Structures are given as C-alpha cells and as structure tokens.
C-alpha cells in the first residue's frame, strides 16, 4: 500500500459537517457505502428539524398563514429539485424514491409493450416492468461492463415503447452514454427512462441535453432524507399518463359516479406528501451544487482510480467494471466471501456493502454470488482507502 494514501488527503468538504461520520465511541468511521445511502450534512438535518418543528404545517389545504408558507416552500423545493437536473417545476413529480418513480412509469405509461433493459439493472428497474405486464428484452454488456449500445441498436424495434437504463451502474460504476441511448430509443419511436440514482449525486445531469424522456432519482443517495425521490418526465408525456394511485390532492372533482383529475405533477401525488423531506431534498441539491458536481466527479474518479490500482496489486483479486468507473468499486477477494470481508472490516470501523446489491441477474452474469463494494461520497478521501486496505490485508491473513 502506498504511503501517499494517508499523506495530506484531498477532501471536498469538512467531515465535521456530517454528524454520522463517527462511531458511538467517537472514533472515525470510514464510510464506504454511499452508493446504498449517503450520510447527511448538518444543513439537511437542520432543514428537516425546522420543517418538522417551528415551520411545520400541512400543504395545499390550509387557509392559515403557516400552511400557505409551507405550501410555498414545498413548491419551491419542487422547482429546486427539477432545476437540479435541468427541468421545470411542472415536470417534476415527488415520489417515495426512484423505485416508486419507475413503478409509476411502468404502470401509468398509456401503451404497454416491449421494454429494453440491460443486464446490469437494479431490481427496481426490472421487477416493476414484469409486474405491470411489459415484455422485457435484455441488452448485453461489453466485456468491461458497460451497457452495449451497439447491441441495443440492433435489438431495438418499433415494438419497443420504453428503453430503461441505469445512468451509472450501482455495482460496476460504469457510465452510460445517455445521449446516444436517447438517440437510439427515439430512432424507433421509443422513450428513454434513466435510473439516475448513482448519477445524480456525482454527475452534472441535464435532461434537456441528454434528450431523455424520464429521469428517476432518490434523495437519500444525494445526501438528503429517505422516503422521498422524484420522477422527472416530459410534460407532454406526463399529461398523457393517467394516475396510478388515488386519494386526496390528485383530484379536480370527485363524485360517486366519476372523478376528474388534477394536471401533472399533482395528478401523481395522492395523499399528504412528504413535506419536510421535500424541503430537505432541495437543501441537499443546493449542498451538492455548492460543492460543484464537476469537482465531485473528478474527486470520485480519482479515488476510484487509486483504489482500483491498489486492489490490482493483490494477487487473485478480481475487480469488476471499467477502469473509468465512477464512484463505485466492486471486487472479489480470493477465497473470501464478501460477507466475511464486510464483517471483519466493520471491526476496523470500515463500512462497505457486501452481497448482490439488488442486481441478481448481474451477479449471474459475473458468475459470483455477490461482490464487495466500496462507494465514495463527498466526504471520502485517501484515509478511507487506506483503512479499507488495512482491513483487507488483515482479512487475507485470517483466510490464508
């Protein structure tokens, strides 16, 4: 292991901004599971506390002043989150997360037909299409773990209504050429949905430049709260989609004979929304922009490159995904189950993910039951890699 891993680590922000980055006894916690969920900065936690405390009221219903103020704040949060990816407020639906966003499209898109997925998709971009009755086709991967768009071009037909790909793989860290994917989908009349869970926290996303049709993301992977995410969709597409859940707020007029519905995005937000979470989601977007997504991308690429280089020196270790993967490194140690590695690393105050990462078809493709996965965030630096490598060396000695 290179000594320079612990010399003057380059950081993007003060780790002290993240209360969760220490253990119960006050020791440094080397958190390398941001791909699953990111730690929360104080500004997000404080925004949640204010929204649940002195500012709290319901939205869209009350005629009293605090409710009106909270409604303004909620709709301002919608504008912020939509603008974060280059959209407008009437195109942004708040959902419980990216999973619900993709379910919404799978169930509510007016014409169900064939959907083209890829071999690396998360279960949340596989199961909803199956449950909603779509015919699923699967695009293969290139040898280094990218979605093979040359193969996709050959597979796509006018029967395909939707192409649904991960913008960044949650296992391999491979980055999709999203603009080309959009062009290929549109060439046969299909729409492109992007799973942006891993891209939104670390890439400068512009849905207009990409020309995608739907974009799904989750706040908790973006340093925001759990229980909320968003679906961005082109206005004309949302206008054509019927609601898929009924209740309050999403209606125009209700009688026992029939109901008419509100326009999007309200049409898809039945019931009392996650108010505090929406406000904190917007603060998280501002937090990311305050650091700068170009800087985040460069920082995480540098950390990935360093970790891949160090792992390649360990004989028998298998590192998955392309060399230029973003934010994520998945690997397999010789003779060590990922769960055993994760348990031993926990004793070293190092947190990684171990298992199939909700990507069982990808694990079958890779020929492994699961992988160990280190994923970075804005708080990650070389000291986290050094701690991970120390834990790996200890593990290898135990299993030698």
Image (cartoon, helix red, strand yellow):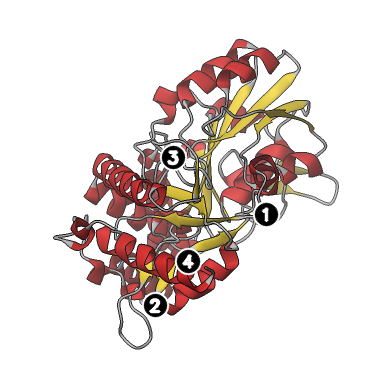
Q: Residue furthest bottom?
A: 25
| In the foreground, 60 or 349 | 349
Residue 33 image position (x, y, % from top left): 45, 61
Quadrant location of the N terminus? Answer: bottom left
Circle 3 is placed at which residue position? 89
Residue hosting label 2: 53
What SS does tag 1 mark?
loop
Asked if the residues shown at circle 3 and circle 1 are in contact, with their CB atoms under 8 angstroms apart, the answer is no
Q: Position of residue 287 (x, y in %)?
A: 28, 55
Q: Is residue 306 visible?
A: yes
Could you tell me which secondary element the residue under label 3 belongs to?
helix
Q: Are marks 4 and 2 in contact (CB under 8 Å)?
A: no
The image shows residue 30, relative to residue 261, as above or below, that is: below
The residue at 40%/36% (across/down) is 323
> Label 4, on which residue?
396
Residue 369 - label: 1
Decide: is 392 above or below 229: below
State the residue at coordinates (44%, 68%).
351
Quadrant in the rendering for residue 116: top right
Above or below — where is 302 with respect to 112? below
Please report whichever mark, 4 or 1, sits nearer to the chain's N-terminal start. 1
Give the Cα separation between the discs numbered 4 and 1. 19 Å
Q: Quadrant of residue 82?
A: top left
Q: CA distance from mark 3 to mark 1?
A: 42 Å
Q: Which is more N-terminal, label 1 or label 2?
A: 2
Q: Secondary structure at mark 2?
A: loop
């Amino acid at each position: 292991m290179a000594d320079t891993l612990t010399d003057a680590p380059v950081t993007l922000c003060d780790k002290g901004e993240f209360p969760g980055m220490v253990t119960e006894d006050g020791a440094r916690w080397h958190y390398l599971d941001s791909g699953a969920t990111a730690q929360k900065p104080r500004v997000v936690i404080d925004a949640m506390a204010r929204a649940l405390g002195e500012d709290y009221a319901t939205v869209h219903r009350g005629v009293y002043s605090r409710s009106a103020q909270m409604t303004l704040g909620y709709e301002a949060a919608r504008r912020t989150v939509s603008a974060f990816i280059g959209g407008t407020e009437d195109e942004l639906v708040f959902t419980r997360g990216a999973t619900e966003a993709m379910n919404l499209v799978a169930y509510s898109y007016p014409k169900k037909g064939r959907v083209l997925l890829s071999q690396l998709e998360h279960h949340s971009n596989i199961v909803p299409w199956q449950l909603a009755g779509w015919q699923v086709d699967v695009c293969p991967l290139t040898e280094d773990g990218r979605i093979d768009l040359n193969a996709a071009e050959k597979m796509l037909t006018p029967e395909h209504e939707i192409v649904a790909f991960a913008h960044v793989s949650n296992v391999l860290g491979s980055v999709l050429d999203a603009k080309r994917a959009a062009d290929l989908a549109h060439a046969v009349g299909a729409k492109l949905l992007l799973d942006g869970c891993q891209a939104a926290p670390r890439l400068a996303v512009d849905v207009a430049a990409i020309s995608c049709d739907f974009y799904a993301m989750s706040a908790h992977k973006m340093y925001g709260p759990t229980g909320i995410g968003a679906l961005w969709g082109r206005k004309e597409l949302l206008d054509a989609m019927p609601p898929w859940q009924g209740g309050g707020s999403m209606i125009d007029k209700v009688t026992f004979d029939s109901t008419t519905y509100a326009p999007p995005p309200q049409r898809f937000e039945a019931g009392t929304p996650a108010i505090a979470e929406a406000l904190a989601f917007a603060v998280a977007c501002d937090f990311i922009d305050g650091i700068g997504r170009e800087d985040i991308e460069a920082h995480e690429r540098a950390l990935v490159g360093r970790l891949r280089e160090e792992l390649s020196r360990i004989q028998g270790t298998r590192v998955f995904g392309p060399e230029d993967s973003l934010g994520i490194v998945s690997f397999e140690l010789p003779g060590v189950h990922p769960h055993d590695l994760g348990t031993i690393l926990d004793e070293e105050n190092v947190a990684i993910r171990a298992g199939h990462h909700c990507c069982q078809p990808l694990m079958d493709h890779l020929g492994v039951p699961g992988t160990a996965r280190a994923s970075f965030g804005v708080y990650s630096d070389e000291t986290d890699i050094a701690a991970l490598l120390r834990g790996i060396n200890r593990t290898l000695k135990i299993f030698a």
